Image (spheres, rainbow, N blue to C red):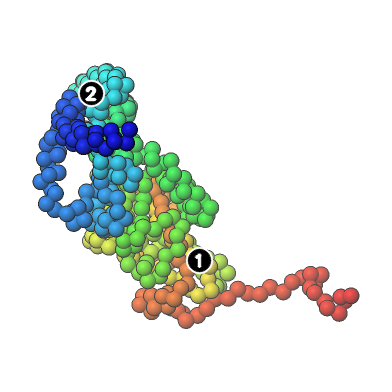
Amino acid sequence: MAHCERASKPLLQCLQKTYTKGLPGLQLQSTRAFQSTALAREEAQAEDKSVPFHKAPDPARVTNRQLERRLLRQGIAPIGSRRRRAALQNSSNIPFEQLPYQCFQEARKVLVADREDKVRDITAMSEKIARLQAVPTEEASGEQGRKSKLRAMELHLEHLKILADINDPLVKKKFEDGQGDLSKPIYRYLADRKWREYRRKILVQRITQMKVIPDVLPHCDPIVDTKLYFKRNQIQPGQFVNAQVSATAPKLDVQLFDGGEKLVTIAVIDSDVPNVEKDGFDFKMHYLAVNVPISATSSKVDLSQLSTESQVVLPWLPPVAQKGSPYHRLSLFILEQKDSKPLDFAAVQAKETERDNLLLRTLQARYHLKAIGAHLFRSQWDETTFEVMKQIGFPEADVELRRKKIDPLPYKRRNPSTFR
């Protein structure tokens, strides 16, 4: 029996070689019915093989942590999870919408039919809006009634656009990969829903637990996602920031989830400035800017780059905490201007000249502002605070605050002579 196995071994090796040679052709014939661009992608990959992967990593396939950090430094985020990127390295490059699964393709047919119904509803609603806009004001029950009706119809139209794409797997895939176009209602809706699931809850928890609400403003319902950056470091709500780091004005990422553009006022206020004379705390405005435009597709705001002639009322003042004082809460608020109309910069600049005891609720009532976003960071005495104080000319920088010791009541005093 062993002699037979030794004699048949060369034949088996020959059969295995011929099988492996014929396998690629069979695979190509079997997958060609499900893909239309696989060969083109393979040719493009063959052309790119001349460039090593470590020099030009693909964000959809990179799995090495060092290469991921290099992409992030270049401003390119890796797509999806690391497990998914590792699986794509050995995939057959079949387009997502052409996956060879019968159940998947049948479900797509149902979704396509449902989307066609929604598209017809969108077309009908658009025609209604156009007809109403063409009707004269006298026949439309007044200008106010016409505006309210148009507003309701436009909101319903936006809702129909969301329903048309909410179940599309390609839309969900693009959003999860970070490739969503925020100029479209569906991606704004998905981004808003994701923000409200976690990050908004953390923000509301911090500003309520640390008493920013109601110390600074009586009420705030955040509807925009506000991210704060000092240099390249993102600051989480309530995080302590070094005095030297906060000496320069921060950068903001204010993500709006509505269509169109808004004009907002940005204010940074310290609500924990110690007042020794009255044994309490005062307010100080560290930054104030008006007429700042934001939109869903333009969310980056650099506080140091805003115009000093038409936007910045009070420039950035580095926050410092005197030695011995409790930590300071630096609250940042995004306030929407009424009807997104610009404020008179000259009048605001002439009126708001003092930083000390400038209350944000006073500005809100004076200029009819509405708080739509917030953020919070904290400052305390550290090894760099004294240098920052000297740079900005802080008075009494070398003074240390100490809590006043209160003597206990007579019946609470400890009398060792009466101890047994």
Dot 2 surroundings within 10 Å: few (below 14), some, or many (20 or more)? some
Compared with residue 186, is residue 400 higher up or lower down, i.e. above or below? below
Instruction: Identify the element where label 2 is drawn.
Output: helix
Q: Residue at x 42, y 74 (%)?
A: 385
| Residue 158 drawn at (x, y percent) | 29, 29
Using residue 402 as the reference point, say whether residue 255 is left or right of it. Answer: left
| Residue 378 drawn at (x, y percent) | 45, 62
Give the numbered dot on residue 327.
Answer: 1
| Residue 418 lies in quadrant | bottom right
Say which of marks 1 and 2 sits in front: 1
Compared with residue 149, is residue 85 higher up or lower down, i.e. above or below? below
Front-most of residues 110 and 348: 110
Q: Amino acid at mark 2?
A: Ser
Instruction: Identify the element where label 1 is drawn.
Output: loop
Q: Residue at x 25, y 41 (%)?
A: 90
Quarter of the image containing the N terminus?
top left
How far apart marks 1 and 2 lie (CA) works out to: 55 Å
Using residue 76 as the reference point, say whether residue 368 is left or right of it. Answer: right
Q: How many marks?
A: 2
Q: Residue at x 31, y 63 (%)?
A: 231
Q: Could one spot residue 259 in this view of the protein?
A: no
Quarter of the image containing the C terminus?
bottom right
Q: Pointer 2: what residue? A: 126
Q: Residue at x 34, y 44 (%)?
A: 83
| Residue 395 drawn at (x, y percent) | 43, 78
Compared with residue 253, is residue 149 higher up or lower down, i.e. above or below? above
Query: Reading the chain from its start, which is encountered first: label 1 or label 2?
Result: 2
| Residue 173 lies in quadrant | top left
